[in-house]
Image (cartoon, rainbow, N blue to C red):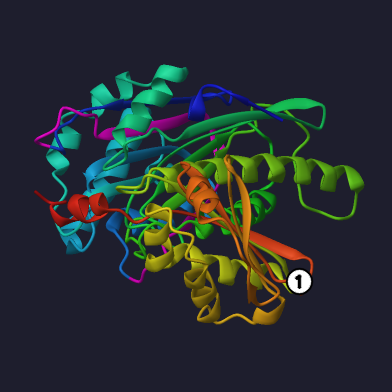
Amino acid sequence: MKEITGGVCAPKGFSAGGIRCGIKPSSQKKDLALIYSEKICGAAAMFTSNKVKAASVLVSQENIAGGKLRAVIANSGNANACTGQEGMTAAKRMAQLAAQTLGISQNEVAVASTGVIGVQLPIAAIENNINALKASLRADEQGNEDALEAIMTTDTRKKEIAVEAEIGGETVRIGAITKGSGMIHPNMATMLAFITTDAAIEDTALQSALRLAVKRSFNRLTVDGDTSTNDMVLIMANGEADNTPVNSSNKCPHCTADYNAFYSALEYVCISLTRKMARDGEGATKLVTVTVANAQSEDNAETLAKSVAASSLVKAACFGADANWGRVLCALGYAGADFVPEKTDVSFKSGAGEIEVFKSGQPVSFSEEKAKKILSEEEIEILVDLHSGSEKASVWGCDLTYDYVKINGDYRS
C-alpha cells in the first residue's frame, strides 16, 4: 500500500467538483460540492448518534438503505438542522436537483450539509447553480480540491488522502476527503467524510469494513465534547478496478486475505483523516494522541483513552506543556472502565523524546525541563500501560486553547 494524490478522484470512474453558490453570503469561498460515479456503486454509511438529526442525515439514511448510490451533493455554511418540514423538503430537493442534472435516480444521491444549526437552507441558491455544479465535475486532483474546499467551514487545513494497494492481483485505489474542526466528540463528530474506491467488494464486506474502520478512527476522535447533528461517513465502491469481488467469508483463505488487504487500506485512510481533524481542532496548537496499552480488551482500552483525550484539564495541560500526570490518572479513574492503578505506568512522548512520569502506581522523579520540551512539540503522545492484558487502543484529540473560545463565541457573527 502507498499514498497517492487525487483524493476522491484517485479511484477510477469518479469525478468531483465544487462551486460558490451563495449559501455563505459573506464569503467568497466555495460552498456546494458534488461527487459522482459513472457506474452504480455499492455504498455504506454511518451517521451521527445524536438524537437530533439534520434533514440531510435523514434523507441520506433513507436513500442509502438499498446499499446503492452514484452521487453525493453537499453544502457548507448551513446545517439544515432543526428546520422542520421546510428543511426536509429542501434536503430532498437537493437530491432531486443532483439526480436530474446527472440523469440518475433521486434515491441514488446522498445529501450532506454542514454549518449553522436552525437556519433554513436557501435552496434557491442551489437550484440556480446546479448546472454550474455539474459543469465543475472533473476526474482529477483539481476536482477533488474544489469539492474539498466546498465542504469546509471553520477548517484551516485541507484533509484529504488517497492510497493504492494490490488486491487479488489488481491495483485498487481508495480516496477520501473530510471536513471537521469543532463540535467533535465520539461517537462521530461535526464531520463529513466521503470515501470512494474502485474496488469490487460485496455489500456486506463493505459495510463491515466501514463499521470497524470508523470504530477505530473517527469514533476515537475528540476535540471539545460535542457530538453534532450532521455527522456522516460514506463510502462508495464502483468496482472499476475489476478485481475479484472482495468478501469477508472465512470459507476460503483467498477471500479473507483480500478482505484484510482492503480493510487495512481503509483503516489507514480513516485514521489519517482522523489525525488531520484532531490536528485542526478549533484553536488547536497540538495533536494529542492517547494510547492505552496492555488492557484486558480493546473496548476497555478505548474507554480509558477517550476519557483522557476528552479531559479539559488534560487538554489545557497539553496547551501549557505542563506534565501534570495527575490529571491523566484522574481521567482514567472516572472513565468507568476497570484498571488497576497500582499496575499502571504513564509516559509523555514526542519528537523531542520520551519521559516516564508514573510507574506501578507511584510517582517517578523526572526532569521538568525535559518534560516541558517534550510537551512543547506540535505532536505529542500520552502513553498509558495497564500491565493487565494484551489489547490497546489510540484516541486522537488536541489541546484546549484561548482561541477555541474566541472561535465559538462569535461563530454565527
Q: Which residues are magenta?
A: 25-51
Residue drawn at x 69%, y 36% is 200
Viewer-nearest residue: 269 or 97: 269
Q: What amino acid type is highlighted by mark number 1?
A: His
Could one spot residue 356 in this view of the protein?
yes
Q: Is residue 76 left or right of residue 122?
A: right
Viewer-nearest residue: 296 or 271: 296
Residue 330 rendering spot, x and y as whole percentages: 50, 77
Residue 274 rendering spot, x and y as whole percentages: 50, 47
Viewer-nearest residue: 110 or 311: 311
Residue 310 rendering spot, x and y as whole percentages: 44, 65
Could one spot residue 340 in this view of the protein?
no
Residue 83 figure quarter: bottom left
Residue 384 figure quarter: bottom right
Residue drawn at x 48%, y 50% is 372
Residue 120 rendering spot, x and y as whole percentages: 13, 53
Residue pointed to by mark 1: 387
Establish if 155 lies above or below 86.
Answer: above
